Amino acid sequence: SQELEQSPQSLIVQEGKNLTINCTSSKTLYGLYWYKQKYGEGLIFLMMLQKGGEEKSHEKITAKLDEKKQQSSLHITASQPSHAGIYLCGADSSGMNRDDKIIFGKGTRLHILP
Amino acid sequence: DAGVIQSPRHEVTEMGQEVTLRCKPISGHDYLFWYRQTMMRGLELLIYFNNNVPIDDSGMPEDRFSAKMPNASFSTLKIQPSEPRDSAVYFCASSLFYGGAENIQYFGAGTRLSVL
C-alpha cells in the first residue's frame, strides 16, 4: 500500500524566514493535495498538483511536484504568524481508479516565532 | 454554503458510554468521509459514502464503530461502547468526486472526543 512520509515532523522558524516542507511517496502520485490545519480546527485545502514538474503558487506559498511524481515540496516565503499550523499532504496513487483511498501524511507542525 | 458542519465540537464521556458524532456535508456533494486523527497514527479514513451508500468501511476499527447516512444532508458516526483508546479528533469531509485526478475534500472543524 502507498505511504506518504512528510519531513520535517515539526519546524520552528523566525518570522520572515523562508521554509520548505517535503512529502515523499512510495508510489507514483496521480494527484497530490496540500492541506493546512490550524490548531484545533479542520483541514483547509491549499493546492492540488497532478503533472510531473508542475508548480503552483498562492500568495506566499508555492507547491511543486517533481518530474517522477513521487515527491512534492511546499515552500513558504517570508513566513508570517498566520502560516503557523499543521501542513498535510494527501495523495491518490491510483489514477482513475475510483475505489482507491486518499492517503494522508502525518503532517508537519509549523511554528512561527515573532 | 456554510461548509461541512460537525457537532458536537467537544465530547467528554466515560468508558462504556455510547457516543454519537454528527455531520452535515456541503449541499450537492455526493461523497462523505469520516476520518480519525491521532498523534500516533495521523489522519485515518474510517468510512466513506457515495450518494448515502457506504462504499468502503475497511477503516472502521471494530464492530463498536458504526456509521449511517440516512439522507444526503446528514450522517452519524456512533461508538458503542466507547473506550479510552477511542479518544481522538474525528473529522467529517465531503467532496463532489472521489478517486481519480480531482478530489478536493472539504473538512468540518472536527469533534474532539475524550473517553475517560
Image (spheres, rainbow, N blue to C red):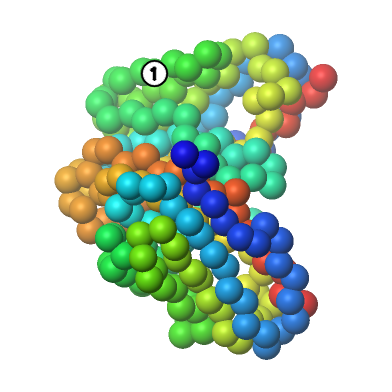
Q: Residue placed at 31% from the left, 69% from the top?
A: B54
x, y (%) of residue A80? 70, 18
x, y (%) of residue A91? 36, 43
Say left or right for B100 vs A112: left
In the current view of this chain or complex, which residue is farthest to the left? Answer: A96
Number of marks drawn: 1
Say left or right for A56 vs A19: left
Which element is circle 1 on? strand
| Neighbours of disc 1 within 10 Å: few (<14), some (14-19), many (20+) | few
Q: Residue placed at 52% from the left, 41% from the top?
A: B2
x, y (%) of residue B59? 41, 69
Question: Which residue position is annotated with label 1?
Answer: A56
Relative to B13, is A31 above or below? above
Asked whether residue A96 is in view, the answer is yes
Q: Residue placed at 36% from the left, 65% from the top?
A: B71
Rendered-image quadrant of the C terminus of chain A: top right
Q: Residue placed at 17% from the left, 46% from the top?
A: A96
Asked whether residue A71 is in view, the answer is no
Task: Name the amino acid, label 1.
Answer: Lys
User: Who is closer to the viewer here, A75 or B18?
Assistant: B18
x, y (%) of residue B88? 64, 64
Relative to A78, is B36 above or below? below
